[in-house]
Amino acid sequence: MHVSIITVNYNSSEHTINMVNSIRTRTMPGLTYEIIIVDNASESDQYELLLPLESFPEVKIIRSRLNGGFAFGNMMGIQHALGAYYLLLNNDTLFQNDVLHLFYQYAQNNSDTGLLTGQLFHEDGTRSSSYKKFPSLANKLFGNSLVRFFNPNDFPSNKAIFNQPTEVGVVSGSCMFFRRTVFDALGGLDTIFFLYCEEEDISKRIRDYGSKVFFLPDARITHIEGASTGRNLAIEKEFFISYKLLLEKHLPIWQSSIIKFLQLFKLLRRSFRSRHYFQLFLFLLRGAPLKESLRYKQRLK
């Protein structure tokens, strides 16, 4: 088996069906692959919509009784994966071309690369952000442009347009193509993250491991953002919880403390314009407590 594709479905089965169809349509013969769909405790009618996909021999559906979040769902799928490479793919994505062959061929020819992503596009055809920098105190204080001016070898801006494979700091979590040996050696995604910051964490750990993280502009994917989550206060609180965990895991305490203070000050300024930001400010002022994560509001089904 060349590639195992793992995707997580949560009450968004129509997107999952469209994603599977795009993979089957765009992937040319010559590459063996499987599609592992982990249903993260969706409602029964949503789960049942997926079942006809099992008529395809390459599709496998796993149903979880618990919505354990993005990392949890993907790691559940990994337990069943047979491929030499893993592609963790959001279910609200669509292949525009033969993404699998492009990723596979590049990884085969570049053994020092542990993680790849492609060029993402919005539904209207405009480019979406496919990569970014790992958060640092210097970037928060002085901005990416100034830091890059004094350190031109730093990772590129996510606003730059490239026509060649380019090494980057952090890839988009919606499309992550891993070398299995590297992913397995690191223990995979850290399931302490429920919904956000998994990509920052795994990208940094792969680079710390000695492998490279690359962006392939020729691999083109449409991303219909927010199909499973939407935006609300609880979801935004979840981001701040994950971001706090990320900073505390990877940065010295004095640096993470300053970044959190800057974040708090930014929310305070915005709170004068919106009650929504004031609520987030109060939440962050209380330390974005982990016990208020959505993970602890899930129930077995």
Image (cartoon, grey):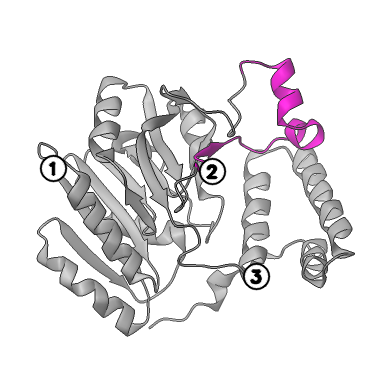
Disc marking residue 65: none
Q: For the magenta stretch, what is the residue range?
A: 127-153
Q: Nearer the viewer, residue 217 or 31?
A: 217
Residue at which label 1 appears? 32
Is 139 drawn above or below residue 50 in the view shown? above
Residue at which label 2 appears? 201
Give the percent coordinates (x, y) of residue 178: 35, 38
Give yes or no for residue 59 being in the magenta stretch.
Answer: no
Residue at which label 3 appears? 291
Give the percent coordinates (x, y) of residue 258: 82, 43
Q: CA distance from mark 1 to mark 2?
A: 29 Å
Q: Residue at x 30, y 35 (%)?
A: 181
Secondary structure type for disc 2: helix
Q: Residue at x 48, y 56 (%)?
A: 191
Classify 10 Å Cα crowding around label 3: few (below 14), some (14-19), many (20 and above).
few
Of discs 2 and 3, which sits in the foreground? Answer: 2
Of discs 1 and 2, which sits in the foreground? Answer: 1
Q: Amino acid at mark 1?
A: Thr
Secondary structure type for disc 1: loop
Give the percent coordinates (x, y) of residue 43: 37, 82
245 to the left or right of 15? right
176 to the left or right of 59? right
Q: Amino acid at mark 2?
A: Asp
Is 250 drawn above or below residue 283 in the view shown? above
Give the percent coordinates (x, y) of residue 105: 24, 27
For the question of whether residue 116 can be seen, the reply is yes
Q: Nearer the viewer, residue 133 or 211?
A: 133
Q: Amino acid at mark 3?
A: Lys
250 to the left or right of 58? right
Give yes or no for residue 141 being in the magenta stretch.
Answer: yes
On-image quarter of the N terminus: top left
Q: Residue at x 70, y 35 (%)?
A: 136
